[in-house]
Amino acid sequence: MTEAAERIIDKLLARYRRDAVLLHRPYPPHSAPRTNSKFGGLPRLPEHHEWPRMPSGVPLHFLAQIDCADIGHPSPLPERGVLFFFGRSDDEQVWDADRPQEACRVLYVQDAFALTPLRAAPDDLPPIGGLYPPPFARPFLHRDEPGPNLYVEWPIQPLRFDSWPDGSAVHEAISPPFDWGQLNPARLFGKPRFPAWVERAGEIEEIVEAYDEMLERRRDAEYYRATQEPRPEEEWNGHSTAVALQLYGDDAAPDAFPQLWSHVDFFCRALTVQIAAGRAGFDDPAATTSAAQDWIARAGGEPAGDPVAGADRADFRAWIASLPKRPSLPFNGIVSNAITEASAAVVRAFAGNPERASLISHSSYDIMAPLFCGGSVFGVQFSQMLGHAPSAQEALSVNDPTVCLLSLSTDGGLGWMFGDVGECTFWISPQDLARRDFSRVWGTIEGH
């Protein structure tokens, strides 16, 4: 990259920086001050407000609630009241901006508080994803088994955050107006070299590409500055035997797997799903399935957050030890993956309750930090309000005044996905935001 291009990029980043609200998902989930803002679970929506539905009558899924009082810095958002975000999460995930009432809804409620009772979901709320259950549920569902209709609940810590636009959003700002007359064949091909506008277009593409590379580093640094979280030392690998061995622990360790009865339940469900799918690796699949179902029944008779007593844990680990294994390892790949999936599932299941979240051992949280605190192959992914919304496709132009009310990113920690590792974004006009009129918000879902 030339010095001139670097100066252009620095000027673009400085010119288009905007304040945003980072919707930080603290990890461990009980480690940050409690707020009334959260992803998923059930909303604290007062009973006299109707649960949003599509014109057809089908209920929308609850995505997040943001208590504006939790935002500790000045912003264009209301100073008080709760914003509830709902959206249609079916197998297509196609939202038509021309018919927003069929895809999403935002409720601005000024009489919702932290002590407002949780609102029960409608009985006819469909499963998330329709035929394609969300990633957090997929390992535990048998073929054609309906998935959950609620997203993973996780507290939100709103933080002030610098945001910058994607390269696709600044392309127009650095491109000169195009003279369509230059496409005259005589002018285009009658010269021995490329016209200046062609060379200029190539330079612009190089600048945008270099801009995106610098932007990724800038966003990464800003994310860890805002959250004050340690950067994971390595990328998450959910199929790593080394990770499973760490989670499994030694027989005598007080936090050896399974620590809680919920671990037993999730592990056995994941195991039976793999066996039912025809995965090889067991001498007697029927007997293994039967034993797993017995353990599921035993776990069902115990509170999910209760520790597995020493004798029960010894029996469970003896059963795992009796299953076919790899040479020099205590288990095979299917068991290894089930241990990891179960450990992640328990973190997600307990994240919305600080008392239950505190039952999980510190060592388990440390081992799984790369999953819940890391980025992805697309860089650090985060959810936000205001500022420049990232886009898996073409980002909104920096010259467009439309406000990003909420941008929800695909999140491996939450186990949710929008499009193909993309974003779900709610948009509002500046005028409607100023009037506190959220009735005309529209949404988009974009994937790679």
Image: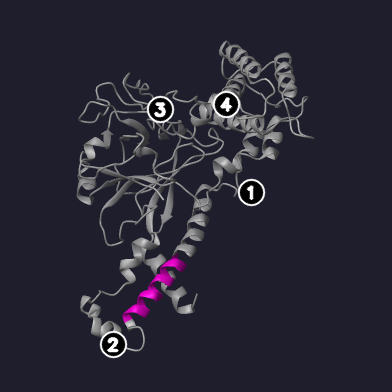
Residue type at the position of mark 3: Leu
Residue type at the position of mark 4: Ala
Magenta run includes residue 205:
yes
Q: Residue 29: image x %, image y %?
A: 53, 34
- The residue where tag 4 is placed is 270
Residue type at the position of mark 1: Glu
Mark count: 4
Pick the front one: 83 or 390: 390
**Contact, CB < 8 Å: mark 4 with mark 2?**
no
Q: Judge depth for marks 1 and 2 and give the one in front.
A: 2
State whether the magenta stretch is mostly helix, strand or loop. helix
Q: Judge depth for marks 2 and 3 and give the one in front.
A: 2
> Which type of secondary structure does the marked residue at label 1 adopt?
loop
Distance Cα–Cα, label 1 vs label 3: 31 Å
Mark 1 or mark 3: name the one nearer the start of the chain.
3
Distance Cα–Cα, label 4 vs label 2: 67 Å
In the displayed structure image, the side of residue 74 where residue 155 appears, left or right: right
Give neighbour class at mark 4: few <14, some 14-19, many 20+ (Cα, 10 Å): many
Pick the front one: 285 or 68: 285
Residue type at the position of mark 2: Gly
Disc number placed over residue 190 in the picture, else none: 2
Residue name at image x 24 percent, y 36 percent = 102
- The residue where tag 3 is placed is 150
Residue 193 sits in quarter = bottom left
Q: Please, which residue is most extreme toward the top here?
A: 301
In the image, which residues are magenta?
Answer: 197-211
> Which type of secondary structure does the marked residue at label 3 adopt?
loop
